[in-house]
Image (cartoon, rainbow, N blue to C red):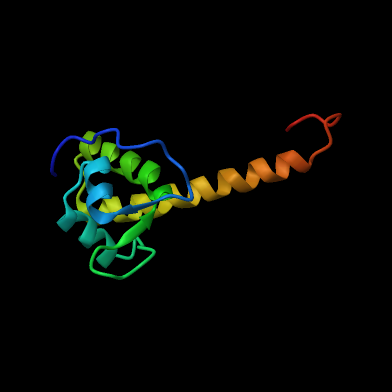
Amino acid sequence: MSQKPMECFSLDASRTVTLSELAECCGMSIAELDELMDYNALVPLTSTPERAFSAQWVVPLRAAVKMRVDFDLDLFTVAILLGQLVQIELLERQVQSLQALVPAHLPNA
């Protein structure tokens, strides 16, 4: 693992971040992020030499890095964990969207 994660910028889902910015924000080395990309757990928006990523990766990646430290996980396990965190985030957004469709007079179950 590289340096301690730092607060980089306010999160905006439409913003893009470079590989080096993502590494700095999440406290991982570029080599570790490359390995996550090899596992297809981290997908860049572009495949140019300075790859760009959606800023939506920052939150789940930071959570995965924290769990990596807390539970002494290897990078392959972090790749699996990252996929699950992204899936959970997607499902939570879907639940919120569906709850918004429920009429106000019906109780939330």
Residue appearing at x 34%, y 55% in the figure:
80
Residue appearing at x 29%, y 54% in the figure:
18
Q: From the viewer's perspective, is 96 left or right of 22?
A: right
Q: Looking at the figure, which quarter contains the C terminus?
A: top right
Residue 6 at x, y percent in the picture: 24, 34
Numbered circles on residues, count = 0
Residue appearing at x 36%, y 51% in the figure:
82
Residue 72 at x, y percent in the picture: 19, 40
Residue appearing at x 16%, y 50% in the figure:
29
Q: From the viewer's perspective, is 107 left or right of 98?
A: right
Vertical order, 75 against 12 (above or below):
below
Q: From the viewer's perspective, is 94 left or right of 54?
A: right
Q: From the viewer's perspective, is 101 left or right of 38?
A: right
Residue 25 in which image quadrant: top left
Q: Nearer the viewer, residue 28 or 40?
A: 28
Residue that sits furthest to the right in the current view: 105
Residue 41 in which image quadrant: bottom left
Residue that sits furthest to the left in the current view: 2
Q: Looking at the figure, which quarter contains the N terminus?
A: top left
